[in-house]
Image: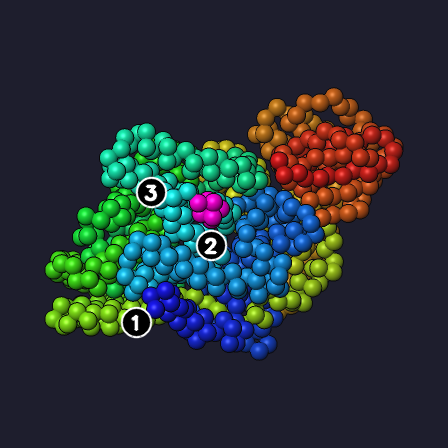
Amino acid sequence: MKHLTFLFFLLPVLAFFFFAQPLFLKGYIPVPADDLIGLYYPFRDLYAVTNPNGIAYKNFLITDPIRQQYPWRDLSISIEKQLQLPIWNPYSLTGTPLLANFQSAVFYPLNVLFFIFPFLSAWSIQVLLQTIFLGLFTFIYLRFLKLHPLSQLFGAIAMSFCGIVVAWYEWNTIVQTFLWLPLILLAKEKLLKKNSNRWVLILFFAECSAFFAGHLQTFFYMFCLDNAYLLARIIQIARKEKKSALLFGIKKYIPFFLLGLGMAVVTAIQWIPTFQFISLSARSLDQQDWQAAGWFIPWQHLIQFIAPDFFGNPATLNYFGTWNYGELVGDIGIVPLFFALYGILQWKNWYVRFFSIVLLICLIFALPNWISFLPFQLHVPFLSTAQPTRLLSVIDFSLVILAAFGFDAFLHQKDKKIFIPCIVLILSFAGTFMYLLTLKSNLINYSVALHNLSLPFALAIAALVVISFAYFVNKKYIVYIGILLIIITSFDLLRFSNKFLPFVPSTYIYPPTATLTYLQQHIGNNRLLATDTKILPANVSSMYHLQAIEGYDSLYLRRYGQLIDYDMNKQADYNRSLPFNRIVTDTSMSNKLMNFLGVKYVVSLNDLHNSQLRKVFTQGKTEVYENMSVYPRAFFVKNIVVLSSKDAVLRQMFSPSTDLRNTAFVEQPFAYTNNVSVGNATIAYYSANSVQIQTNNTGEGFLVFTDSWYPTWHVTIDGKEDKLYRTDYNYRGVIVPVGKHAIQFMTSLW
């Protein structure tokens, strides 16, 4: 019977997906598409006739999946189905890397689902599998640790529905990365015990899957944890067997090291392009404000470990805590938290000591203090651009493992120390109630906090009563009490999950609208610009194969960000923070840049008074304007100016006397003449990874193509490789000989 215990884990999973969130019963999808049609135009226009006040949306906080992960995965899979690598995204930011964008998860093994099922069905299955796999891997890891079957079940449920998992659930990247951790730890345990080809393959597959799953920071934390775990276990085993820690450690570690080298080779197809992109990105300029509130976990937000909605919840539109909720909620359930405190007391157990130390270290670096500030003050690479709140993934995992040990000790009634976590929990609630009194000056926040503290407090009281009662009954009834505590935990966590996560009708996902249809029919290879952040959010245009100048990404090209920044603020300080916070948009773009970047259509919610714009379409509140002065995407210039610095290029580009239609600025010296020919250029073929342009000119000419320059792009003229010049700060230029020619721009992996 104990081997069937995991089947009981499926009960809360089924309850969540079939009843609390009708994923399959009503054909709902785990994508926050209600935000798309409830918050943004022209989708609001689509439903305005039947819903004058707009479509209700559940959680405005989690718009990222519809603006990033879903569009990127959709584009990647569509290109892969053409038997090509999805190297480039032409739809955002005037062209940007796609494969090198880690979150596109191009090589994730579970993407095989997208080649079996329709995209939306495959996405839903992937999301569902996060819960099942994370629970299963936690369960079998705890089984290896020889915990009681109920403790295994308890840990699996707490892990699968804890705060950090729920908060990032619909991203389909962070949890996909994290779910492999318990399997990785189990595989290392198996291999430390006995060499096994099966477990070598499992470890290799799990490590690579975690890397390819789409979230580099989470993988980095996992990598640090599982390698610290391996080294600590080797030392512990050496001491236990009374062997030399150094010699024994080297002998045991070498196979894992070789396996790691093999993994590095296999994953090079991802990490080499990614690190190249990072080196050319604006991430170091875009995330410098590490002293801002919410960069670390504010001390008062530790309350969310016992009452996740003490500061309100974005799903109920009453959150008043530090931004943002999803980065700060570390709840694992009030009952698991109690047993995590009890688990720490089982200090003689090596695993308890290890995860207690990991928990302490992660809390130190996640909370604001002089130690956690050091990586940012010292500008440590990678760490100085990583938000430490993401350490909650390791914090929650450590708490759950400790909770499983605590629950196991309770089931075996090993000692009477259980009164210690009882006192700690009571004092924690007492401190929380004292903090609550400080909110009385704001009655709305006070009432929200009081209301959201009530249920956790009631569940804590109920749990304490049940736990106390267990020590006065016959030991044979302890299993039933354990089951009751698991039921309380399931109710607590499923209630929290159901409150936060939106599951919506599939008809909400990127619906066609009259505005978008008009743009698709008329835009050709030109671009569009939205003058308001409420219109067609960044990256969504790719779902309609519309090219936009906006984009939203934690990685975007530094050069492009600086170009837009200069247009907005006329500054060229290359060390200052850029004003975008990962969402690059220029809602007041100058006519000069708009024309140069090939913006043919401007979409607005207000009348635009610009002599070169003509209103051509209206749907509800959305107005579409055609730019009558737009430049072609590829054109010949009359003059070439070679400058020695990028600062000079920006200043000259935006000089009132400069006509970008006729003058190109190049930073690389080359032999040229200003008697260049201005011929004709026509885009004959345009795809993500390849562009073909037919040219005809009476003399040697210089062709400017306004897609972003990037080192992996190459150019051929009539099939022969030629020199590609970075032109006009961020774009492409090539010298074209006299006559008719076929110019082809192609991208490679590196």
Q: Residue at x 24, y 61 (%)?
A: 407
Spot the residue most to the bottom. 50
Q: Residue at x 43, y 62 (%)?
A: 131
Q: From mark 2 to mark 1, how far is it between C-alphas?
A: 26 Å
Question: Which mark is first along the chain, 2 or 3?
Answer: 2
Name the foreground residue: 201 vs 18. Answer: 201
Question: What kind of secondary structure does the magenta stretch mostly adopt?
Answer: helix
Name the foreground residue: 685 vs 146. Answer: 146
Tell me the magenta residue range: 196-203
Tell me if residue 329 is in the magenta stretch. Answer: no
Q: Which residue is mark 2?
A: 176
Q: Is residue 444 visible?
A: no
Circle nearer the viewer, 3 or 1: 3
x, y percentage for residue 2? Answer: 33, 66
Which quadrant holds the N terminus? bottom left
Q: Amino acid at mark 2?
A: Gln
Q: Which mark is residue 487?
A: 1
Query: Could you say whether the residue bearing mark 2 is in a helix, strand or loop?
Result: helix
x, y percentage for residue 174? Answer: 45, 52
